Amino acid sequence: MNVLKRATNKINFRSIIFFLSVLGPGIITANVDNDAGGITTYSLAGARYGYSMLWTLIPITVALIITQEMCSRMGAVTGKGLADLIRENYGIKITFYLMIALFIANIGTLCAEFAGWAASMEIFGVSKYISVPIAGVVVWWLVFKGSFKLVERVFLVLCTVYFTYVISGLMAKPDWLEVAKGTLIPSFSFQSGYVLMLVGVIGTTITPWMQFYLQSAVVDKGITIEQYKASRLDVIIGCIITDIIAFFIIVTCAAELFAKNIRVETATDAALALAPLAGQYSKILFAVGLANASLFAASILPLAVAYYICEGMGWEAGVGKKFKDAPQFFSIFTALIIIGVGIILIPRMPLLDLMLISQVVNGIMLPFVLIFILQLINKKELMGEYVNSRIYNVFAWASTIIMIVLTVILVVTSFFPTIA
């Protein structure tokens, strides 16, 4: 009996060690979903519509898991990034235009992340002219001088800081019966503001650059099909965690802001408004969460862009490589940091317009990226026995079609706000 117990413990210990060795890409990529824009969207959803949008997090989690799992599986099976596979299967011309569009879109998104960092630091009395350059240098140094393992460990630590939102939500002391109703019973309103907010909440879930980063990270980490079961668990856990964080952001703002009819326009407004209601600690926790999310995304986004451009063009890429081995990769990464920091420091820069343009371009690109993913994952000559099953394809295509419809609505209402 003791022998059996020791053997079981040994197997469990080995399983845990094996999982920890693969842990990283899935959790990191999913958590980047809760960037400055995502936190603002969830904050506004809770502040304006209470608990009524919590139910959306269930289908959001399912859609996120399906999309992320496919990219992770492709990376493990093929050993190639998504941009690499698109170039090999659809040609350099299509890949080039796709890379250009994504690059333009992500300049605006990167500026949004640095803007979120600047706003959160200003809550603590630090000027953006100090905080933003420091953030840029830290992000650049970490990737330029660090190894893949070091960078990944730092990112995993940053993921844990998101739990400040869980603490903030518990401090808000919500009505848990109302929270349960909002989570388990779908509700809907045809009011234009509600529809637009609903589209925004769901639309912040899946972005094109996240899929490129996840697959590249799986390849860079050296995950193979033999390790894939553990990698898939990493993806699932990451998607669940990121939507738990979103859940508590909505709960916090619903309990403290919606219940008291306090109007906010940004996540920064939400943090400041929480102080007299839920206490100074709640404001600090909310602001720390925003700062962390912004810096985290500002680190991942330029990495993702550098990865997919280099893969798409057939250049060497990878954290931990020397500059002489991957000059284009590090040059693109450095240029993005400089551009992002520089734009934020320009006085009276119309950041909202820049963010709107990036949102629209990302929205236009998303259907193409999702369709590329679905076509590639179902190529027998590429994936062998690891293509999608028929049932999996039903869910994958259904999620994709819904995301495309919602994205079209988001793009249209961005251009023509009077429609909403």
Image (cartoon, helix red, strand yellow):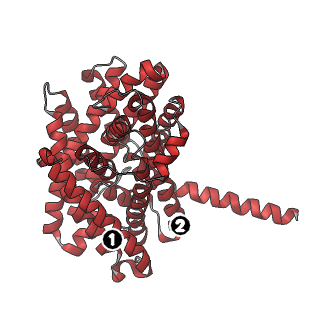
Q: Residue at x 66, y 60 (%)?
A: 14
Any part of residue 314 in sight:
no
- Please state which of the two labelled residues, at mark 2 or mark 1, is closer to the viewer: 1
Report the residue that reaches farthest toward the front. 190
Residue type, label 2 = Lys
* Total numbered badges shown on the rendered structure: 2
Classify 69 as above or below 25. Answer: below
Viewer-side residue, 185 vs 154: 185
Q: Nearer the viewer, residue 320 or 239?
A: 239
Front-lying residue, 208 or 170: 170
Report if residue 177 is visible in the image: yes
Where residue 73 appears, x then y in whole percent?
42, 68
Q: Position of residue 278 (x, y in %)?
A: 47, 23
- Quarter of the view holding residue 378: bottom left
Residue 170 percent across, percent down from the top left = 54, 33
The answer to whether residue 178 is above or below residue 80 is: above
Name the residue at the right extreme: 1
* As drawn, 147 above or below 225: above
Judge left or right: residue 196 versus residue 167.
Answer: left
Residue type, numbered disc 1? Trp
The residue carrying mark 2 is 229
Question: Going by the image, does 94 lie left or right of 278?
Answer: left
Task: Say whether disc 2 or disc 1 marks the residue closer to the N-terminus.
Answer: 2
Residue 303 place in picture, x, y as percent:
31, 48
Element type where label 1 sits in the image: helix
Q: Residue at x 34, y 16 (%)?
A: 125
Q: Which mark is residue 397?
A: 1
Quadrant where the N terminus is found in the figure: bottom right
Q: Residue at x 45, y 38 (%)?
A: 251
Instruction: Report whether 254 appears left or right of 21.
Output: left
Name the side, left or right, on which 232 lies relative to 310. right
